[in-house]
Image: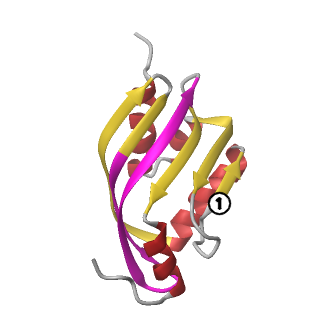
Amino acid sequence: MSETAKDVAKQWYAAVHAGDFDGLFGLMAEDCVIEYYGPSVIPFAGVYRGKETCKAFFGHVANDVEIALFRQDEFIADGDLVAVTGRLEMKLKATGRDYASEYAHVLTIRDGKVARFRDFQDTAQALHVSLDIATPQR
């Protein structure tokens, strides 16, 4: 039985949780794209094209934040697309401020590899944490 897009996505997140960067990057296409939406003051916001540049994204994350929780709740697949919902809690090292958000990731899987990763979360709150200004209360 061949791997489904959902299987590949689950393996990719398992590599993240294990700190297995060889496994993580091994599951990424050479021409992969990572899109983290938000203003440039967020240290890792932007579009990363190509595997080597995508590695820089994960370097930013590793260097810029302390992750307390990175949970995946749902994997919803439709063909080569996998939507993943979950919760992220972290501290931005530069400001010492905490950030927490539900998120949605959309992965495009091609030939058993992650070809595109889009990250949607509360970037307004991330901006407040990045600028070290008062975070709106909810």
- Was residue 83 drawn as part of the magenta stretch in this picture? no
Of all residues, the one furthest to the top in this rendering is 1
The magenta stretch is 85-110
Helix, strand or loop at label 1? It is strand
For label 1, count other residues whose C-alpha is less than 10 Å away and answer few (under 14), some (14-19) or many (20+).
some
Instruction: Tell me the quarter of the picture where residue 109 sits.
Output: top right
* Vertical arrangement, residue 103 with respect to residue 115, above or below: below
Along the line of sight, the residue nearer the viewer: 10 or 21: 10
Name the spot of residue 40 as percent of width and height, x first: 65, 71
Q: How is the image coloured?
A: secondary structure
Q: Is residue 108 visible?
A: yes
Name the spot of residue 26 as percent of width and height, x first: 58, 36
Of all residues, the one furthest to the bottom in this rendering is 133
Q: Residue at x 48, y 42 (%)?
A: 106
Q: Is residue 56 visible?
A: no
- The main secondary structure of the magenta stretch is strand
Name the spot of residue 78 as percent of width and height, x first: 42, 26
Q: Residue at x 50, y 38 (%)?
A: 107
- The reply, left or right, for residue 28 in relation to residue 79 is right
* Vertical arrangement, residue 68 with respect to residue 5, above or below: below
Along the line of sight, the residue nearer the viewer: 79 or 98: 79
- Was residue 89 drawn as part of the magenta stretch in this picture? yes
Along the line of sight, the residue nearer the viewer: 19 or 98: 98
Q: Residue at x 44, y 52 (%)?
A: 19
Where does label 1 land, which residue? 46
Instruction: Tell me the quarter of the picture where residue 28 sits.
Output: top right
